Image (cartoon, rainbow, N blue to C red):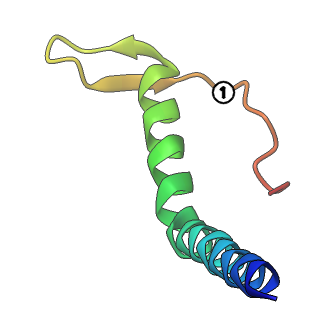
Amino acid sequence: MKAATGELQLTVITMIAIAAVIGFFWLMWPSIKNSIGSQWDSISCEKRDANGNCIKQNTSRINEDND
């Protein structure tokens, strides 16, 4: 019986840990997505000025409406 109780406790701990990881990414996903998008925009620049600021963006983009 002790082995079954220990196994149940380990299962509950594992489920709580998985829920915590999923919850963390669920809360953080909008900021992660925005960060990736801004970094993508900075590398997709076609033309830069002398200071390195983007003058012309690459207009060939993937449809962003599909999450």
Disc 1 marks a residue whose amino acid type is Thr
Q: 14 or 27: which is nearer to us?
A: 14
The residue pinned by badge 1 equals 59
Q: Which residue is at 85% across, 54% downward?
A: 66
Residue 57 vs 1, above or below: the answer is above
Q: Which residue is at 41% across, 12% downward?
A: 47
Residue 17 vs 44, above or below: the answer is below
| Position of residue 8 in the picture relative to residue 45 (left or right) | right
Q: Which residue is at 22% across, 17% downward?
A: 52
Residue that protrudes farthest toward the front in the picture: 1
Q: Quadrant of residue 4?
A: bottom right
| Position of residue 21 in the picture relative to residue 54 (left or right) | right
Residue 25 in the image, given as x and y percentages of width and height? 58, 65
| Position of residue 42 in the picture relative to residue 53 (left or right) | right
Residue 53 in the image, given as x and y percentages of width and height? 25, 25
SS type, badge 1: loop
